[in-house]
């Protein structure tokens, strides 16, 4: 289907590489005007590019000020891998998403779509509800204390897993927040994907990553994820709200079947 997103203005964070780059490409191919955001300069497949460090709340607020009105879609894709310091992971993978999204809501058109790129790593969110609830009021200045209180460290990739768990829950919680304007929010959860940061996941997860590789027929590609994001931004997905869509080659279904002896 050509021109699925014709005439739509869509913001994509992390547009310079990986899933963000591929998403910007398919959105442009489908007729959208893409506004890209990244810390690294890359003008591929974007109408306008904004360079910003999303670990800095001042940079996020400046972005909110300079981005135009009339936004039809927001893709919160920017994120760090589990090898980076836990404080940075929480800042960029979780708090920046919330701050940018809430700040841009007044600039979104009615019936706009927000898509959060979460992860299969967020699958275990029901076991982290206490920390997720505590993070609801977390701000950039309180990250270190929060990490100590809830034992959110880099060990075993826990900091990365937590940010994705909390992001999935935040998506569900806001299923109807902007319903009076027709604005919907959903998340897409990739499994292992061949992107520039896949090595970071292999280094962190070790045996767990080897087990995933044994079960799966192949790792995903950015081109497997981007079309799902594009669909969620289109008018065809208006009745999907607060939903997390696993895009993982069947890994989440495999985990569920093993959990329940199916």
Image (cartoon, helix red, strand yellow):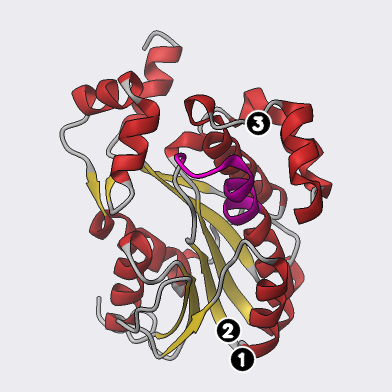
Binning the other alpha carbons within 10 Å of mark 3 as few (below 14), some (14 to 19) or many (20 upward) gives many
Q: Which residue is mark 2?
A: 71
Estimate how packed mark 2 is, as few (under 14), some (14 to 19) or many (20 or more) residues with alpha carbons within 10 Å.
many
Q: Which residue is mark 3?
A: 152
Q: Which percent across, then down, holds residue 128?
A: 67, 27
Quickly name the residue at label 1.
Answer: 68
Q: Which-is-in-front pick, marks 3 and 1?
A: 3
Residue 118 part of the magenta segment: no
Q: Residue at x 57, y 47 (%)?
A: 89
The image position of residue 104, as x and y in percent, is 68, 76
Q: Earlier in the sequence, mark 3 or mark 2?
A: 2
Magenta highlight range: 82-94
Q: Nearer the viewer, residue 188 or 140?
A: 140
Residue drawn at point x = 57 percent, y = 69 percent: 53
Q: Which quadrant of the rendered structure holds the C terminus? A: top left
> Can the viewer see residue 130 in this picture?
no
- In the image, 171 versus 83, the foreground residue is 83
Residue at the far right: name it.
137
84 is within the stretch colored magenta: yes
Where residue 6 sits, quadrant-wise, is: bottom left
Above-or-below relation of 108 to 211 = below
Rendering quarter of residue 163:
top right
* 228 sits left or right of 142 in the view: left
Asked if residue 191 lies left or right of residue 239, the reply is: left
Whether label 3 touches label 1, CB < 8 Å: no
Viewer-nearest of labels 2 and 1?
1
* Residue 23 disc label: none
Residue in the foreground of this view, choosing between 107 and 52: 52
């Amino acid at each position: 289907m050509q021109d699925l997103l014709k005439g739509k203005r869509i913001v994509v964070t992390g547009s310079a590489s990986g899933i963000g780059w591929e998403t910007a490409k398919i959105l442009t191919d489908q007729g959208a005007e893409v506004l890209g955001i990244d810390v690294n300069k890359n003008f591929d497949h974007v109408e306008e590019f904004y360079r910003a460090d999303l670990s800095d709340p001042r940079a996020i607020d400046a972005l909110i000020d300079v981005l135009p009105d009339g936004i039809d879609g927001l893709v919160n894709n920017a994120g760090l891998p589990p090898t980076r310091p836990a404080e940075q992971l929480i800042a960029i993978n979780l708090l920046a998403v919330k701050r940018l999204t809430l700040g841009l809501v007044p600039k979104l058109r009615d019936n706009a779509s927000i898509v959060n790129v979460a992860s299969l790593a967020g699958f275990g969110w029901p076991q982290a509800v206490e920390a997720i609830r505590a993070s609801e009021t977390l701000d950039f200045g309180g990250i270190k204390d929060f990490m100590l209180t809830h034992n959110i460290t880099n060990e075993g990739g826990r900091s990365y897993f937590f940010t994705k768990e909390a992001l999935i829950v935040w998506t569900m919680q806001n299923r109807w927040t902007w319903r009076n304007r027709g604005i919907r929010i959903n998340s897409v959860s990739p499994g292992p994907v061949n992107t520039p940061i896949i090595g970071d996941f292999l280094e962190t997860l070790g045996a767990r990553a080897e087990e995933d590789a044994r079960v799966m027929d192949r790792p995903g590609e950015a081109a497997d994820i981007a079309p799902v994001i594009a669909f969620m931004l289109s008018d065809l997905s208006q009745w999907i709200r607060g939903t997390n869509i696993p895009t993982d080659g069947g890994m989440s279904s495999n985990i569920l079947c093993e959990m329940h002896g199916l």
